[in-house]
Image (spheres, grey):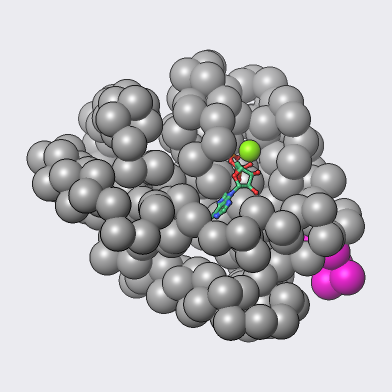
Amino acid sequence: MSVIAFVNQKGGCAKSTTCVHFAFWLTRKKHRILVVDADAQRSSSIWLESLDTQIPSRVIQSSDELLEEIPGLATQCDYLLIDGPAGLSEASRAILFRTDLALVPCQPTGVDLRSASDAVRLIRQAQSVRNGPPAAAVFLSRAVKGTKLLDEAMILLGKTEVPILKTVVHQKQAIADTFGQGAVVWELSGRPAAESAREFDGLFKEVMELLP
Ligand SMILES: Nc1ncnc2c1ncn2[C@@H]1O[C@H](COP(=O)(O)OP(=O)(O)O)[C@@H](O)[C@H]1O
Ligand SMILES: [Mg+2]
């Protein structure tokens, strides 16, 4: 009965990838999951349909429907995951009015850091209207190992008003390959996939501790 949303208006920051991996991770732990795909590209629902493991998803894109349907859908599962849309839209606001936890994936580059701070601003607005919720956190995704930007990103993000998760998900071909293979990293062989799987394990453990 917890609602967890991946939000960031910037496309390509790994919202759908993280959402699908989290849905799989929770399903493997025997939780009942429903994914609401709020993005026009529908990547997470298409991806989930291609997995061997059955994980239900619903495509809901209008802000009115998101506002009206999320609470009812949340009662039908243990965790309702929302894959947020690109663009700072009414739909993003609707999601932030209904979610318990908002997660902002962010690539550690200048432009992406700016868009993460726009997402944080929307989250702060929702927290003000709702007098507390949603809980929120930023995490770094698609980070390239050994680049200086990563440290700078951590310092910059440290100034935002939501916590940054300790786990960083690095850029890896194994992750890029998963969508096309109708799979998630835990199902792929090889060391790079195992390393990415460990990163996702660490990230999701941290996320679970944030749940109200
Ligand atoms: N850690 C990663 N390493 C390599 N490629 C990644 C990683 N995370 C995401 N990608 C790739 O980046 C692209 C954008 O990711 P996606 O999850 O669709 O972002 P969003 O939903 O925020 O637009 C996809 O092609 C995906 O395969
Ligand atoms: Mg997406």
Total labels drawn: 0
Residue at the image point whose x is 71% and y is 67% from the top: 184
Observer-nearest of 64 and 42? 42
Is 102 positioned to the left or the right of 123 in the image?
Answer: right
**Is 154 in the magenta?**
no
Residue at the image point whose x is 83% and y is 72% from the top: 53
User: Magenta segment range?
Assistant: 51-55
Is 179 located above or below residue 54 in the figure? above
Residue 32 quadrant: bottom right
- Specify the quarter for ligand 2: top right
Residue 179 x %, y %? 76, 54
Is 135 positioned to the left or the right of 26 in the image?
Answer: left
Observer-nearest of 191 and 1? 191
Residue 61 x %, y %? 70, 26
Q: Quick check: can you spot residue 60?
A: yes
Residue 56 x %, y %? 81, 57
In the rendered image, the quadrant that contains the N terminus is bottom right
Observer-nearest of 140 and 20? 140
Residue at the image point whose x is 75% and y is 41% from the top: 43
Residue 41 x %, y %? 74, 30
Q: Quick check: can you spot residue 116?
A: no
In the rendered image, the quadrant that contains the C terminus is bottom left
Observer-nearest of 150 and 124? 150
**Is 54 in the magenta?**
yes
Residue 31 quadrant: bottom right
Is 194 positioned to the left or the right of 207 in the image?
Answer: right
Q: Main secondary structure of the magenta part?
A: loop
Residue at the image point whose x is 78% and y is 65% from the top: 183
